[in-house]
Amino acid sequence: MYDEMRLIELKGISKNFGDTQVLRNVDLYIRKKEFLTLLGPSGCGKTTMLRIIGGFEFPTEGKVLFEGKDITDVPPYRRRVNTVFQKYALFTHMNVFDNIAFGLKLKKMGKQEIARRVGRMLELVNMEGYEKRWADSLSGGQQQRIAIARALVNEPEVLLLDEPLGALDLKLRKNMQLELKAMQQELGITFIYVTHDQEEALTMSDTIAVMSGGRIHQIGDPKKIYDEPKNAFVADFIGESNILPGVMPEDDVVEMAGQKFPCVDEGFDKNEEVDVVVRPEDIMVVGQDVGMLAGTVESVIFKGVHYEMMILAGGYRWKVHSTAMQPVGSEVGLSIVPFNIHIMHREAVSGK
């Protein structure tokens, strides 16, 4: 049964390049007006998936549906999508106005309507007054804005973005993250975004699909992905984590680092071997006599808003983030509340 909120669906998508399989039976749907990010390391298949959605590649197996209709074999120019690449591919022999207007002129749109739409796009990307500037005279951030305006001026239902901020410096990249999200919300267009930067994904996305080895490991909103990773790969790739082997002797109890800890996880087999995730910011440094574990501070790094300490306790080096610094050599205790201990079924994960 067709769900009208599902704008795009990928069903059983696999893609081979020669003997190499880069996508493995992927199922995914993207909702209308959603900002969905494909997140994963280089070579995980995320750009190939984006290109299949855009029609630049065709799957070896599976189907692509748009509003319930099969578009698997439909060429890019007949799909209601536009793409922004990391290399902006602006026409350097044209000025800003002509770059943005290029697609509209191909459609033989009237001059007044072209001027109206280009003006609207320049306003949206904060580039008013740049109409007559040559594209190659712009900074990287300005070129990125023009590339986005050129894609949006055609009023696509879907905008595909393949690591468009990768060439920008850190400060400009962070500013553009916020601007892109604001544009998407204002225009109500579905954005499908590819990145290997987990902070970028957490900042902008409504939904994140974490990929590795040609498959999707977990799909969810940023908070769910961060707080409740499905496996060790997701936990390690999204943010910083302490990942330890553990055993579940019974519900709501996990044994790790030589101690038993209360937790809030149930439904595991008795004495099942598990992976345990504890985020560095969820570990409290307390007095050695009151901690759940006793340990020694081995190193301290100031990170700006917090200190990062490596603390040897229970035979494991714990990464701890705290606003209070304990000097190297200090004997301390570590305490973790049950809610901040996340238990995962152990599984073999490819592509790590």
Image (cartoon, rainbow, N blue to C red):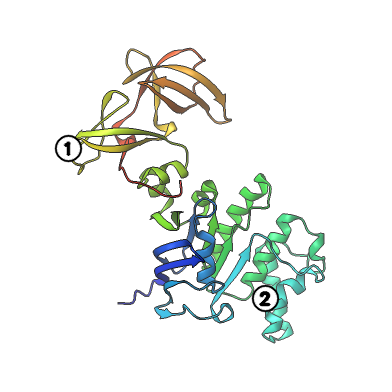
User: Please, what is the three-letter code of the amino acid marked with disc 1?
Assistant: Lys
Q: Which residue is mark 1?
A: 270
Residue at disc 1, secondary structure: loop
Question: Where in the figure is residue 284, as x and y percent of width and height?
Answer: 39, 25
Residue lying at 49% horizontally and 58% vertically, measured from the top left: 38
**Amino acid marked by disc 2:** Arg
| Residue 39, disc | none
Q: Is 287 displayed left or right of 42 in the figure?
A: left
Q: Visible in this render: residue 185? A: no
Please tell me which residue is depicted at 42% across the width and 77% down the height of the picture.
Answer: 67
Residue drawn at x 73%, y 58% as measured from the top left: 142
Residue 187 relative to residue 320: left or right = right
Residue nearest the observer in this picture, 351 or 282: 351
Pointer 2 residue: 117
Q: Residues within 10 Å of mark 2 (few under 14, many from 20)?
A: many
Q: Position of residue 161 (x, y in %)?
A: 58, 63
* Front label number (1 vs 2): 1
**Percent coordinates x, y for residue 240 in the rendering:** 47, 37
21 w.r.t. 114: above or below: above
Q: How far apart are the alpha carbons under marks 1 and 2?
A: 64 Å
